[in-house]
Amino acid sequence: MKFFIDTANLEDIKEAQTLGVLDGVTTNPSLMAKEGITGKDNILKHYLAICTIVDGDVSAEVISTDFDGMVREGEELAALHEQIVVKLPMIADGIKACKYFSDKGIRTNVTLVFSAGQALLAAKAGATYVSPFLGRLDDISTDGMHLISEIREIYDNYAFNTQILSASIRHTMHVVNCAKVGSDVMTGPLSSIKGLLKHPLTDIGLNQFIEDAKKMQL
Ligand code: G3P
């Protein structure tokens, strides 16, 4: 399973990259706004800065909600850097734009997916990635993991190439469960990646080894 980090924070991206397990980055307008980035030039510069830190795909989301606007923005974003993946909302014009970009060989990420039917449409339109929002379904007492399993089953039935990019990951068990059901990618905050490191028995065991190593008088 690929690990993407879901942030526009350059320090977090650098830290995940340094760990050596990072395969890509996803952003969205909320995450960009959180970093206080304003103005088109600064936003484009920020995407470029992200591309220089990480080797893999970087999802950059369009703001427009109409086909022409999405195509205009998406083409500009895709031309910015070869690592950029155009992120499109799961609406009719987003699906049309997805098909347009897919026909042109431009990679896409269809976002705000909350049902298996939406994921099926995104795959039919040739999406490179589909982003089901796991945590936001859990937030409303709906089993987000079940959706990931349903999409996995549908994509496997028809050998769709679209990769399941499980998004809205909130914690390490989301990451582990995504791996169990065969999600192709997970994108989460740095804490969800670093949380995988933690186990008290690892810390207790290491302390014991360090103490015992002292007896070896190396
Ligand atoms: O990638 C989508 C993600 O940013 C949404 O996460 O935590 O806002 O539901 P969240």
Image (tube, grey):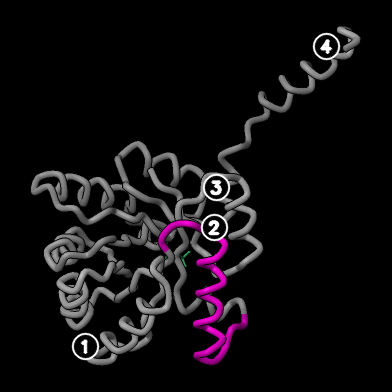
Residue type at the position of mark 1: Phe
Mark 4 → mark 2, Cα distance in angstroms: 37 Å
Q: Position of residue 183 (x, y in %)?
A: 32, 46
Q: Are marks 3 and 2 in contact (CB under 8 Å)?
A: yes
Q: Position of residue 206 (x, y in %)?
A: 74, 22
Mark 4 → mark 3, Cα distance in angstroms: 31 Å
**Disc 3 secondary structure class:** helix
Near mark 4 (Cα within 10 A), the count class, few <14, some 14-19 or many ≥20, is few
Mark 4 → mark 1, Cα distance in angstroms: 66 Å
39 magenta-colored: yes
The dot on residue 193 is: 3
Query: Which residue appears at 31% of the width and 60% of the height?
Result: 132
Mark 3 → mark 2, Cα distance in angstroms: 7 Å
Residue at mark 2: C-beta within 8 A of ligand 1: yes
Residue receiving disc 1: 67
Near mark 3 (Cα within 10 A), the count class, few <14, some 14-19 or many ≥20, is many
Near mark 2 (Cα within 10 A), the count class, few <14, some 14-19 or many ≥20, is many
Residue receiving disc 4: 212
Residue type at the position of mark 2: Pro
Q: Are marks 4 and 3 in contact (CB under 8 Å)?
A: no
**Disc 4 secondary structure class:** helix
**Disc 1 secondary structure class:** helix
**Looking at this view, is 105 or 213 the one in front?**
105
Q: Position of residue 191 (x, y in %)?
A: 59, 52
Q: Quadrant of the N terminus?
A: top left
Magenta span main SS: helix
Q: Position of residue 117 (x, y in %)?
A: 15, 62
Please name which of the two marks, 2 or 1, marks the residue nearer to the observer: 1
